Image (tube, rainbow, N blue to C red):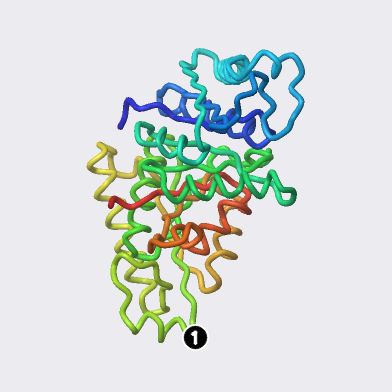
Amino acid sequence: MVDAPVVVGYDASEPASAALVWAAREARALGATLRVVYVRDAHDLDVAAHPHGADLGERGDAGAWPVVEEAAALARDTVPGLSTETTVEYASPAGALVAESGGARALVLGATRHGGLYEAMRGTVVLQVTAHAHCPVIVVPAAGPPPSLAPDAPVVVGYDGSQSARAALDTATRSAWWLGRPMRVVVVWRPGVTEWVVSRGPTEHEAHDVTEADAGPVLEGAMVRVEELLRELGASEGAVEVTGTVHEGQVVRVLHHEAETAERLVLGTRGRGGFTSLLLGSATHTLVRTAACPVVVARAPA
């Protein structure tokens, strides 16, 4: 959906403000409209807006619309010339944002800090939306991107050959092409019991750890797919610098380290169905909350 907007969930919190600024810049890079969405609980009948108990003073007393319009104005100040639109929804936050994702190019949310009842509740919303959204979800750290980020910081994608990872690979390739950034494909393998687990034969729909024997062919297959997609996008040979690397180790630790120098980290949902936490898989579940850079979660087509 090339003409679809970039949607950002906003609630006047510090994480949401960081997400707003990042989303504004993403929308500019993609030539898209920024849609700012403020979701109030369906049972919140108070006129004044006091998101998660915060005192917004006169801004909050005037209701929800001034809050979201102020956010849109901030986005336009950050990115002059940016086209914006706003909406206020009275619904379940997770349900409303998932619904918004159906017509979005990307959905941007702020990551939660650790501690406190509100942060626990907000973190649940972020994870629910990430697991169920119909478009890529970008979770931005509360502090925003590191100030020391290199201008040529790459788009990094974690890849294991699964269907979910293939969706992430395609999303990362498109992002690198649209943004004019280099791309790095990271394959992580683990020895030991993993060798036996993989030998039991997971299906293509299941996430699985890569063995040492798998790693080379998995990376080679990823590089071939990236080249194919870049040609489909109209990129000339060498237009996007693409590198691949294989690491031995624990997936979360390796990708957490990669995120420290990445412009963004792209992951698949690694979904199996069932409980919300399992819809994401343990690596993605952890990294959306702890990575130093924005984490993009791409959902494989149903």
Quarter that holds the N terminus: top left
| Residue 2 image point, x, y percent | 31, 29
Q: Which residue is drawn at 53% across and 37% down?
A: 93
Left-right relation of 134 to 110: left
Q: In this view, does 85 lie to the left or right of 219?
A: right
Number of marks in the image? 1
Residue at image location 24% in from the left, 50% down from the top: 228
Q: Is residue 55 above or below residue 253?
A: above
Secondary structure beneath disc 1?
Answer: loop
**Image height check: is 51 above or below 64?**
below
Residue occupied by mark 1: 192
Q: Residue at image x 38%, y 32%?
A: 104
**Quarter of the rendering containing residue 62:** top right
How far across and down, in percent of the image, does residue 207 sit? 39, 67
Where is residue 123? Give x, y as percent: 61, 48
Residue nearest the viewer, comparing 65 with 249: 65
Front position in the image: 270 or 67: 67
Q: Which amino acid type is marked by label 1?
A: Gly
Q: Position of residue 232 (x, y in %)?
A: 22, 42
**Residue placed at 55% from the left, 73% from the top?**
249
Near mark 1 (Cα within 10 A), the count class, few <14, some 14-19 or many ≥20, is: few
